[in-house]
Image: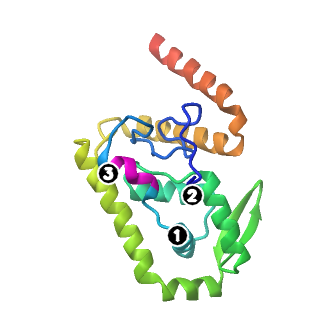
Amino acid sequence: MDGVDNSPRRCGFGMPGCRWGRRGMGGRGMGGGEMMRAGRMLAQGDLKLIALALIAEQPRHGYDIIKMIEEKTAGFYAPSPGVVYPTLTFLEETGHVIAQPEGAKKLYVATDDGLEHLAANRALANAVFDRLAAFGEMMRQQNGDSGTEGNDLPPLLRAALDNLREVAIRQIVKDPDNEAELVAILARAAGELRKT
């Protein structure tokens, strides 16, 4: 297994536990060709390297790494927390990052050893980032998406929707057993909006 739960219970747009990001169409029988290979997009060791590269840019939480990879693919792929957090633990055990407690979360910071390792492998890290960006662009073109989704919304509404999505993702990452409650809350909110 690649650490990705594609069951209908876990998969939905924007759910980091899914093979596909917010715009993806994962699952069996949907899509084909390149879409079906997205789960194999990161070769063994790639996630360790790009997680380290992202942390070297600035200290990050695990959720930030998931979000950054999703952004690099224009929303079409997001690694699951079940893959990202063990990767961060590995980087910590090898001395490439340190984890600093920050409330209930950990903030990961690159060490000198991690920066040296990244410098020695910078070309490979850049190639992985290029591959992620190319995949996102290819998927956007296949789906006829100009990349302007949501840009026609008023800025405050767009910001509110982005905030709602981020909070929902944080909550499901924090407590996956809370999924039914989160869905009920979002369904009530949608019902209220329909009344206006």
Q: What amino acid is labelled 1 in the image?
A: Leu
Mark 1 = which residue?
54
Measured from the top left, where is residue 106 in percent x and y?
A: 72, 62
Q: Secondary structure at mark 2?
A: helix
Taking depth in this image into account, of 59 and 136 the one nearest to the observer is 136
Q: Main secondary structure of the magenta part?
A: helix
Is residue 196 visible in the rendered image? The answer is no
Residues at marks 2 and 3, CA–CA distance in whole angstroms:
26 Å
Eye-nearest disc, 2 or 3:
3
Q: Which residues are magenta?
A: 35-39
Residues at marks 3 and 1, CA–CA distance in whole angstroms:
25 Å
Q: Is residue 29 magenta?
A: no
Taking depth in this image into account, of 33 and 10 the one nearest to the observer is 33
Q: Are marks 1 and 2 in contact (CB under 8 Å)?
A: yes
Around disc 3, counting alpha carbons within 10 Å, would you say few (fewer than 14), some (14 to 19), or many (20 or more)? few
Is 120 displayed left or right of 23 in the figure? Answer: right
Q: What amino acid is labelled 2 in the image?
A: Asp
Q: Is residue 34 above or below residue 88?
A: above
Taking depth in this image into account, of 49 and 59 the one nearest to the observer is 49
Mark 3 = which residue?
34
Residue at 41% x, 70% y is 128
Residues at marks 1 and 2, CA–CA distance in whole angstroms:
9 Å
Measured from the top left, where is residue 119 in percent x and y?
A: 50, 87
